Image (tube, coloured by chain):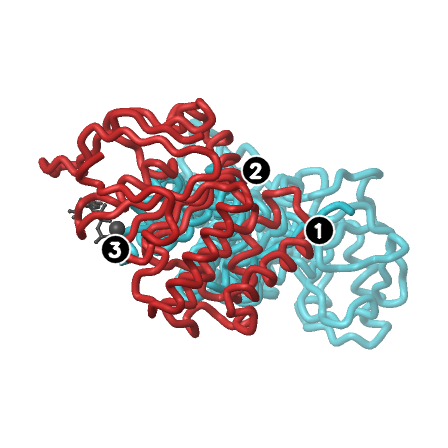
Amino acid sequence: MLSAEKISKRYNNNRRQILDSIDLTLDEGEFVAIMGESGSGKSTLLAILAGILLPEEGQVLFDGKDLYSLSDAELSEVHRKKIGYVPQSNFFLKNYTILENIVEPFVNTNDADPEELSEKALAHLDRLGIKDLADRYPHELSGGEQKRVALVRALLTDPRLLIADEPTTGLDSETGKIILQYLSDYVASGHSVLVATHDEHVKEYAGRVLDITKI
Amino acid sequence: MKPRRRNNLFKDIRRHAFYNACLLATIILLSIMLLAGTIVSTSLRTGMGNMQKRLGADIMLVPKGSKEKAENMLLEGSRSAFYFDASVYEQVSGIEGISEVTSQCFLKSLAADCCSSEVQIVFFDPVSDFVVAPWIETEYKTGLSGDSVIVGSDIASEDGTIKLFGQEYPVVSKMARTGTALDSSVYFSTDAKEELLKNAEEKGSFLTEDQKKSGILSSIFINVKGDHLVDGVIEAAHKSIGDIFDVVYPKKLHESLAGSLLKITGVINIVSISLGAFLVAILLIINSIIMRSRKQEVALLRVLGHTKKRLIGKLITEMGVISLCGAVLGCGLGALIVIPFGRLIGNSLNMPYLGPSAGNTLFQILFIILGVFLIVFLSSIFFIIHATNIEPYLALRREE
Ligand SMILES: Nc1ncnc2c1ncn2[C@@H]1O[C@H](COP(=O)(O)OP(=O)(O)OP(=O)(O)O)[C@@H](O)[C@H]1O
Ligand SMILES: [Mg+2]
């Protein structure tokens, strides 16, 4: 489903080669974790695979099509429906409630019914144990709660591929496990998940664990 | 069921309340300035254009000692009365070198039953006239004879007639607005003078001794032939009627006023251009700050599948709503300041000031709203496009 070929990346005027000719494939129904020490380029790789950071060299093929040669409209469609992304740092629209943060971005873009989207979001929040936060505002939430909200936002339209950057970092191991189990269930229902993490627990859930320095 | 569209426009504007308030304030100032600038300078210009029409004579002879009164009447329309003996006209009109000559007679402070305030009555000779005709606004339909009148623009006549001292006079034409007291004058043909004075006296109006005399006139307007000197004509007039008159130079009055108008509009232009440039610079700064603070929001929405086109449209709509509100508020405030105080502005500048009509003002306001939108659009579009073009991952990282 996703295959990256010879991905290389350096940042603008930085001589350090962050990613050097990386190949990676991910199949339908796979749960892959990428591990590696801080600064090794995990976030950079995930962003490139998610179609939100241009690689210097190489191609990212999603369903056989190079993400970076799609038009803006086509790439947006992929982001809207097929690839969900959870960034490493949390970001929300500050005067929107949690529920609005999850639902509003999709309301006028997808042909979905806002009521249905809200119900779906609430169901996700419920299963992640934070349903009662739906009407609060982002700044009132803890980091771990925000992380779960970001996960729900990325999952709302049932993307075939979910890319999550450090989904469990900063959480207690109980909450971490809830999230990993959640991702694992998502995979079980026929989707694919790619995470970057330092969390050793991931090994119990992921089908494949890769060291970024060895791919 | 078709999905309901939701509009978060105002919520999104409120999210950046502080910067958007700064933006709004700047736009309001810009609109006030643009509106005040255009209204004041067009009013001065139309006032001047109109005055030029009234000041179409090289010289105006008035009784000795009345120079200042006469000038004030020409410039500000203040009501005056001063008299020559009518025989003076015959003597002066015979002077060599005169191309056009006509006389007028003014009556002031006649309480008239047509009008709530007193009117100034002007008698002029339609045959030799060359000073009243140029500022008649509506064409004469019938000739002006002893029993009809032309009225200043402030004098209302519902049924096409006005009543003065018990007699009805059909209104055959109206003067262009001057923005001065001249707008409440009534213009008669000289033929009507005797009868009107008689009626006035019968109705109990107080007439001065001068006014009771039959052959009187107030001023003689003269245009001098191109190959003759104005001073020569004045000299000849002295010889012929003696030292009984002062000379007013209407065309020169206009020239000197036109000179000051040029200076004043020059100052207005310089001030508005520099203030405008300053405000545009502030707009640019605010827009750059706004878009810098919104980069992450834009990036997040792109990650969630919003197209660049959609985001640009959304941001421009927000700017558009703010600039519309600002321009409307600014024009409203500007109009509140400039329209009531317009006359005051004209007076303090010592210039003729003729405020634009309501329709004209509305047109200027629409024009300014459009212009302000364009300025805001141009001052933000670069930042908007830049923000939507940053790679989403890079913008999201900068948060940290
Ligand atoms: N925008 C940028 N400009 C320049 N250098 C950058 C930029 N983003 C990341 N880097 C550098 O690239 C390297 C990889 O960063 P990246 O965030 O991908 O690492 P990571 O493996 O995700 O680290 P962590 O585990 O701490 O999240 C780091 O050395 C970082 O300093
Ligand atoms: Mg990282």
**In front here: B190 or B341?**
B341
Locate residue B393 relative to residue B130 in the image: left or right.
left
The three-letter amino acid code for the residue at tag 2 is: Gly
Circles 2 and 3 in contact, beta carbons < 8 Å: no
Label of residue B4 in the image:
1
Locate residue B12 relative to residue A16 in the image: left or right.
right
Q: Position of residue A202 (x, y in %)?
A: 33, 54
Q: Are marks 2 and 1 on the same chain?
A: yes
Quadrant position of the C terminus of chain B in the picture: bottom left
A9 is higher (above) or lower (below) than B22: above
Q: Nearer the viewer, mark 2 or mark 3?
A: 3
Residue bearing mark 3: A198
Q: Position of residue B1 (x, y in %)?
A: 78, 47
Q: Residues within 10 Å of mark 1 (few under 14, many from 20)?
A: few
Q: Chain A colour?
A: red
| Mark sitting earlier along the chain (2/1) | 1
Question: Please, which chain is the residue tagged with disc 1 on?
Answer: B
The residue that appears at 29% across and 52% down in the rendered structure is: A197
Circles 2 and 1 in contact, beta carbons < 8 Å: no
The residue that appears at 72% across and 42% down in the rendered structure is: B126
The three-letter amino acid code for the residue at tag 3 is: His
Looking at mark 3, is its residue's CB closer than 8 Å to ligand 1? yes
The reply to whether residue A204 is visible in this rendering is yes
Q: Nearer the viewer, mark 3 or mark 1?
A: 3
Q: CA distance from mark 2 to mark 1?
A: 89 Å
The three-letter amino acid code for the residue at tag 1 is: Arg
Q: CA distance from mark 2 to mark 3?
A: 113 Å
Q: Secondary structure at mark 2?
A: loop
Q: Chain B colour?
A: cyan
Residue bearing mark 2: B94
